[in-house]
Amino acid sequence: MMMLIRLYNVSKVYPNGAVGLLNVDTYIRQGEFVFLVGPSGAGKTTFMNLLTRQVLPTQGQVIVDGRNVVRMRPSEVPYLRRAVRMIFQDYKLLPNKTAYENVAFALRVTEANPRQIRARVMESLELVGLAWKARAYPGELSGGEQQRVSIARAIVGDPTILLADEPTGNLDLDTSWGIMELLLRINKRGTTVIMATHNRSIVNGMMRRVIELDGGKIVRDDERGAYRREADHGMVLPG
Amino acid sequence: MRLTTVWYFLAEGWHSARRNVSLISLGTIAASLFVLGAVGLILMNLNHISQLLQARIEIRAFLEDDLSPEGVAAIRAQIQATDGVAQVTFVSKDEGLRRLRGQLGEHAGILDVVGENPLPDAFDVRVEDPDCTAQVAARISRIPGVLSVNYGRGFTEKLLATMRLVGVAGAAVAVLFVAAVVFIVGNTIRLTVISRAREIEVMKLVGATDWFIRWPFLVEGMVVGLVGAAVSGLLLFAGYKVTVRYITGLAPFIPVITAPEPVAALCITLLIMGVLMGAVAGGVFVKRYLRV
């Protein structure tokens, strides 16, 4: 399988001295579904923000889909972000726009062909099962539904990579599994999915590649991993 | 750029301008541009008046008595050949007396007391550049056969100095008010950036280019500048009309500009300036606050 993402000895130290990542050397293949686990402050979000160039590493190189993220010109960044989409714990939907408009917004700002926008937005909303709520505002939707809209927005431009930063962090377990099902479906269509999470039962139930970070370092990388090895011995609080 | 995109920029800019511009900031912009325009009008009028006056500035070179016609012609040729001279007209002593009578008006009787025509023959000399009047006059005075020269010494220099002073003061005021307008528009843009922080964040995340994010703010700046300029332009145009009527009633000899075209041109210039300043402020400040 093709290497889609490659991190060469990447470190990120923030101006205040906080360590984001420390000498991280890893790769992610095309079509993979990868969990990033680890305690808060372990570097999961830094890892993701490096891939969309929201932060630059203080050392090392980051290659995403053949592009050198560190050396790219600022004018190339928007095009990177069209290929690498993110979803968040707090959804980041625009409250004054309907579900449809929120999804269409992602296409409109990339100056997509207006004649295609409607079809593609509806297709995305159908995929997440919310076509019937296209006219609802985020405030009228449940947390799970809002996350589905944000997923629809992320995939409407057919991204190569989908980064999910604690997408189930605000959702109950049933709803979370619904979101996971959706992410798996998107993964099966060929999109590489990287998901940072604290949700032990989801990680353990999916049996996918798990990269564990701690203090900015990769401390574990299992092809079919669990949330924590210690979890089997009941050393981790349920969460 | 797609038409729908252009439409999107215009709509976004217009809506956020309506949302974020307060009457106070719009009023301040209009007032600043109004003062700017008023300074412009004063300068235009001074320029108009000075041009009229400068057209009248002539050097009069009086000739010695008892010159032969050939001698007069020779002096004429010499004056004509002097640097900076545009035009030379002969004024005979009789013609000079007639003009003097006209200028004295009801006091012309004094000339009858004098009896014989006291004036010598003279040349009226028009110069190419009013700034050089003094030098040209000095050169002419050195020509043999020229008795003396007279060119309204002092008045010319004073007029030109006043023009320059008003010009410099006007420019300083203009710079001040341009800065004020740019600052106010910039502040409006800042409010928009703050109120739309989330939207901008999402735009960046889904891969909007910097210019795509910036354009609506540019449009917003232009809208704010345009509306402010339109208000001040209308006030200025109407205000000038009233002022001119007042001045011409009070002091009809002051040759103020009465034609509407140059005033309208100034108002349109103001409008264009408002739009440009708005665009500049929008572009500069959005870059500063956005960090795209």
Image: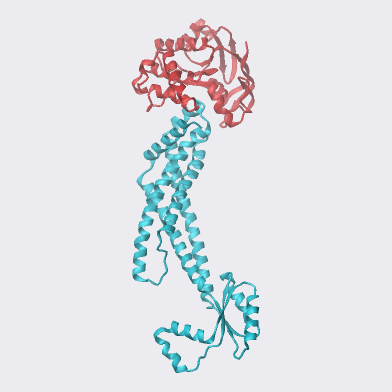
Chain colours: A red, B cyan
Does residue A227 appear in the picture of this structure? no
Q: Residue A127: percent from the left, percent from the top?
A: 44, 13
Check the picture and name the quadrant holding the N terminus of chain A: top right
**Which residue is at a point 38% across and 26% down the rendered structure image?**
A97
Q: For this rendering, which residue is in front, B125 or B2?
A: B125
Q: Residue B6: percent from the left, percent from the top?
A: 46, 34
Q: Quadrant of residue B248?
A: bottom left
Q: Quadrant of residue A83?
A: top right
Q: Is residue A124 above or below residue B83?
A: above
Q: Is residue A112 above or below residue B14?
A: above
Residue A94 vs residue A10: left or right?
left
**Which residue is at a point 45% across and 43% down the rendered structure image?**
B222
The single residue placed furthest to the front in the displayed view is B69
**Which residue is at a point 52% across and 27% down the rendered structure image?**
B207
Q: Is residue A226 above or below residue B7?
A: above
Q: Quadrant of residue A73?
A: top right
Q: How many marks?
A: 0
Q: Residue B229: percent from the left, percent from the top?
A: 41, 50
Q: Is residue B223 above or below residue A24?
A: below
Q: For this rendering, which residue is in front, B5 or B82?
A: B82
Q: Residue B230: percent from the left, percent from the top?
A: 39, 49
Check the picture and name the quadrant holding the C terminus of chain A: top left
Does residue B228 appear in the picture of this structure? yes
